[in-house]
Amino acid sequence: MTGRTSKNVLDQEAVDLLQQARSEGHLRSLGGLNFVLTGTMTLSRQDMTKLILALNGHVQNGVNSATNVLIIADTTNSTKYREASALGISIMTEIEFAEWIRTTE
């Protein structure tokens, strides 16, 4: 399996999980948490933003001390990733995010 094929499988898994999460009625409320997106998302940035806003979260353009979670695509060498790491901010992939919002507290 090539790296590209593997990435396509992961992309489809992320899309499936996020679409399923959007269609379910018992999703976690994000309770005002601040999110930043980085990298080329599987879903459009607009769709990811709508999903986060629908769950009572906020989307920021850049990482700062008010950021709670950085959602990464496939890059871990971005400036946002390094800034979030330095600030001790939670970092999760799209798949981890989709799984996380499907769990209720």
Image (cartoon, helix red, strand yellow):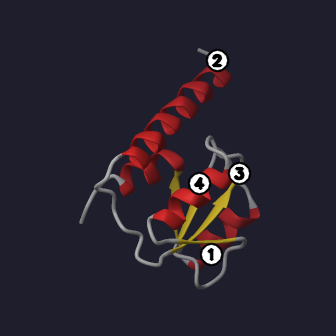
Q: Which residue is mark 2?
A: 2
Which residue in the rendered view is the most extreme toward the left?
A: 105
**Numbered label attached to residue 39:** 3
* Residue type highlighted by circle 3: Gly
Q: Which residue is mark 1?
A: 86
Nearest the camera: 6 or 53? Answer: 53
Cα distance, mark 2 to mark 1? 33 Å
Q: Earlier in the sequence, mark 4 or mark 1?
A: 4
Q: Are marks 3 and 1 in contact (CB under 8 Å)?
A: no
Q: Residues within 10 Å of mark 3 (few under 14, many from 20)?
A: some
Cα distance, mark 4 to mark 3? 12 Å
Asked if residue 10 lies left or right of residue 96, the reply is: right
Cα distance, mark 2 to mark 3? 21 Å
Q: Earlier in the sequence, mark 4 or mark 3?
A: 3
Q: Is residue 59 above or below residue 45?
A: below
At mark 2, the secondary structure is loop
Residue 83 spot, x, y in % from top left: 68, 72
Q: Earlier in the sequence, mark 2 or mark 3?
A: 2
Q: Which residue is mark 4?
A: 48
At mark 4, the secondary structure is helix
Residue 44 spot, x, y in % from top left: 67, 46
Q: Is residue 64 visible?
A: yes
* Residue type highlighted by circle 2: Thr
Cα distance, mark 4 to mark 2? 27 Å
Identify the image quadrant of the C terminus. bottom left
Q: Are marks 4 and 1 in contact (CB under 8 Å)?
A: no
